[in-house]
Image (cartoon, rainbow, N blue to C red):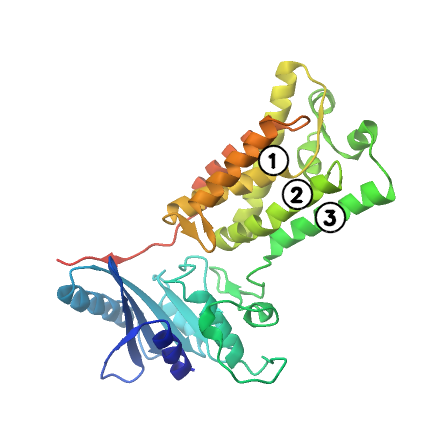
């Protein structure tokens, strides 16, 4: 496995730094502003280094390299081991590291780990999948096309290199279809089928009876459950499809970045605040309108994603600050210039998502070592 990894890095443009110690390999990529250094540690048993030895070694490598280069040094470690729990203990305080399980050919990331390093994660996961005995190609070819950095359908992402949470418990969830977000999308679709296709509930009274947000029912009859149920109702197929497409892709990215429980809190918290905003506006204007749809929660997800992308220097996976900003602007503009759109819910959900992300999201720490 180590030889394939070294070949992969060479094809990505990394250069080797010779180290006369067995099991330690250094590769670096020199760009205009910083040096990106990968420290590969082959640790079959997991007892090759203590926690202090590992941290001291990494610090010494940074110091030696920064003394030779007048650039910022960014160091990332990849452990190769079959003793993942032992290595987890060794690297518990280091967010700039990944673990490759050499038994299961899986890339292990914990919640505090950096989600990517110099764009190598996708190709690395595909490389591991191809090395796995469970991987099969349609033409039985042995061609190594992992260097293109994209996982094809049926390749690495289908087998799903699992993400681990901070308790060390494996979560066998596909990278592209995270558990909670997929469940929310499926639940919205299922409820729509039941209420709209089977029961043909298209008129206002039926939606109110089905749990739509209606402020007189909340204010005078204490039906606070409507602040939850309205999120799962949609007024038509186009309403459902538009919401679910956005939720499927942006929500999936956010769940991977924040973790499933924080994501659930952001989703429902934003939806509740969006509902309160909608009720407050309608009460103030004395409008007896009903509100349905997941868009308040989705605007919260988008707002949270904007915050997460911003604190990660303007990019997270395949999403940039510019893309999020343009989406928010076009969505709000479309709502403000259209009839029958609950803009109060959208704005309330957006602001709630940003605030909740600021409270709940913890950015992985970077250790950038500068000369001197």
Local secondary structure at mark 2 = helix
Circle nearer the N terminus (1, 2)? 2
Q: CA distance from mark 3 to mark 2?
A: 12 Å
326 or 270: nearer the viewer? 326
Q: Which image quadrant is residue 44 in?
A: bottom left
Q: CA distance from mark 1 to mark 2?
A: 13 Å
**Disc marking residue 326:** none
Q: CA distance from mark 1 to mark 3?
A: 17 Å
Tag 1 and tag 3, C-beta contact below 8 Å: no
- Which residue is painted at 51% across and 63% down in the image? 163
Residue at the extreme right = 199
- Which residue is painted at 44% across and 43% down in the image? 322
Report the side of 132 relative to 293 (left or right).
left
The percent position of residue 156, horizontal first and vertical second, equals 55, 71
The residue pinned by badge 3 equals 189
- Which residue is painted at 71% across and 46% down in the image? 188
The residue pinned by badge 2 equals 242
Q: Which image quadrant is residue 117 in?
A: bottom left
Label 2 packing within 10 angstroms: few (<14), some (14-19), many (20+): few
Tag 3 and tag 2, C-beta contact below 8 Å: no
Q: Establish if 216 lies above or below 100.
A: above
Circle nearer the N terminus (3, 2)? 3
Instruction: State which mark lies toward you, 1 or 2.
Output: 2
Label 3 packing within 10 angstroms: few (<14), some (14-19), many (20+): some
Report the side of 283 relative to 128 (left or right).
right
The percent position of residue 228, horizontal first and vertical second, equals 67, 37
The percent position of residue 264, horizontal first and vertical second, equals 58, 46
The residue pinned by badge 1 equals 296
């Amino acid at each position: 496995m180590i030889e394939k990894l070294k070949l992969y890095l060479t094809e990505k443009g990394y250069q080797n730094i010779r180290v006369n110690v067995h099991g330690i390999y250094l590769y670096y990529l020199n760009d205009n502003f910083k040096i990106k250094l990968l420290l590969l540690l082959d640790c079959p048993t997991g007892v090759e280094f203590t926690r202090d030895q590992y941290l001291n070694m990494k610090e010494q490598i940074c110091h030696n390299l920064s003394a030779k280069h007048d650039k910022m040094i960014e160091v990332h470690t990849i452990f190769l081991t079959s003793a993942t729990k032992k290595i987890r203990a060794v690297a518990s305080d280091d967010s700039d590291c990944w673990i490759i399980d050499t038994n299961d050919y899986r890339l292990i990331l914990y919640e505090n780990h950096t989600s990517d390093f110099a764009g190598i994660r996708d190709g690395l996961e595909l490389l591991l999948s191809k090395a796995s005995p469970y991987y099969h190609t349609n033409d039985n070819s042995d061609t190594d096309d992992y260097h293109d950095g994209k996982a094809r359908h049926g390749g690495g992402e289908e087998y799903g290199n699992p993400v681990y949470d901070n308790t060390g418990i494996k979560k066998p969830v596909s990278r592209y279809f995270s558990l909670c977000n997929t469940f929310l999308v499926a639940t919205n679709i299922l409820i729509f089928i039941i209420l709209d296709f089977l029961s043909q509930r298209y008129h206002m009274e039926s939606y109110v009876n089905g749990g739509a947000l209606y402020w007189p029912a909340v204010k005078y009859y204490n039906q606070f459950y409507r602040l939850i149920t309205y999120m799962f109702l949609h007024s038509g197929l186009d309403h459902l499809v538009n919401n679910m497409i956005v939720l499927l892709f942006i929500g999936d990215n956010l769940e991977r970045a924040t973790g499933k429980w924080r994501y659930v809190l952001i989703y429902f918290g934003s939806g509740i605040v969006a509902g309160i905003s909608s009720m407050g506006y309608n009460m103030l204007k004395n409008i007896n309108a009903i509100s349905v749809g997941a868009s308040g929660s989705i605007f919260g997800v988008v707002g949270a994603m904007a915050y997460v992308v911003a604190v990660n220097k303007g990019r997270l996976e395949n999403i940039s600050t510019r893309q999020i900003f343009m989406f928010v602007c076009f969505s709000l503009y479309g709502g403000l210039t259209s009839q029958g759109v609950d803009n109060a819910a959208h704005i309330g959900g957006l602001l709630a998502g940003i605030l909740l992300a600021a409270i709940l999201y913890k950015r992985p720490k970077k250790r950038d070592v500068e000369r001197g």
